[in-house]
Amino acid sequence: MSTNAKDKLIVALDVDSAARALDLFAALRDVAGMFKIGSQLFTATGPDIVRQIVAKGGRVFLDLKFHDIPKTVAAAGIAATRLGVSIFNVHASGGAEMLKRTADAVAELADREGLARPKVIAVTLLTSLDPASLKQLGINEEPRAAVARLARLAADCGLDGVVASPREIGVIRQTISEREFLIVTPGIRSSHDPSDDQKRTLTAAGAITAGTDYLVVGRPILNAEDPVAAARKVVAEIDGSLRSLEPK
Ligand code: C5P
């Protein structure tokens, strides 16, 4: 099994206690490359859970989807950098100045203080928004067109990538030619997993073939009888897909 495949799996620690999150981290740290801490766990337990996982050598994607005035989001980005996260995200709809100031503030701090620079990625459109809800927000484009436009904006403002539903990977790769532009994809399900509330899912292999860099998987691993075995299965699927893409 290549470490490359393991590094592509991000497990979403969508639990509400530090003890449960740390148990999952301990069980899964050798199987998955990164752990996502989102609003639920962060709001329940505070930033200390990030510090603890980072102190134990874990890599963290801080999924707090910052969206505020440029100064505030840049300051939150600085705080995330000091916590030692590997990736954090902001809403692309916060606008160009917010995106640029955040990317610049993080790069400058990392350089000045010799810290690792986290990747800053953008949420384009929440995948829960359908064309009717977009219309209510005054967005009359097709979701794919809006995603492409916001991904382009993020790239132009110096961000490292985007969070995207599996169905959007193709349009993003077509719009942004730089291969180093990261795509992080939730909504991963195998054919026998319940889809839960995810409407547009793809298998791990399908998402890798479509060109994603990282997969975020929560409930199919957290709710499995054996989370380690479930995570290993996802990594095996990623590995198979990476091998099939290698030049023969
Ligand atoms: O449990 P599941 O595998 O659906 O978890 C997916 C994770 O990715 C959750 O933490 C969810 O908040 C997050 N996410 C998502 N869809 C997005 C953005 C983030 O499911 N568009």
Image: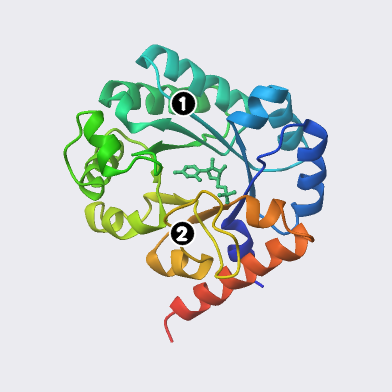
Label 2 neighbour load within 10 Å: few <14, some 14-19, many 20+: many
Label for residue 106? 1
Question: Is residue 2 in view?
Answer: no
Query: Marks 2 and 1, Cα distance to the nearest angstrom?
Result: 33 Å
Residue 216 % position (x, y): 55, 51
225 or 133, nearer to the observer:
133
Label for residue 201? 2
Residue 151 % position (x, y): 29, 42
90 or 84, nearer to the observer:
90
Residue at x 24%, y 30% (from the top left corner) = 136
Residue at x 38%, y 66% (from the top left corner) = 210
- 230 with respect to 240 (left or right): right
Question: Is residue 16 in view?
Answer: yes
Residue 242 % position (x, y): 51, 72
Q: Secondary structure at mark 1?
A: helix
Quarter of the image with the C terminus is bottom left
As drawn, the residue found furthest toward the left would be: 140
Q: Amino acid at mark 1?
A: Val
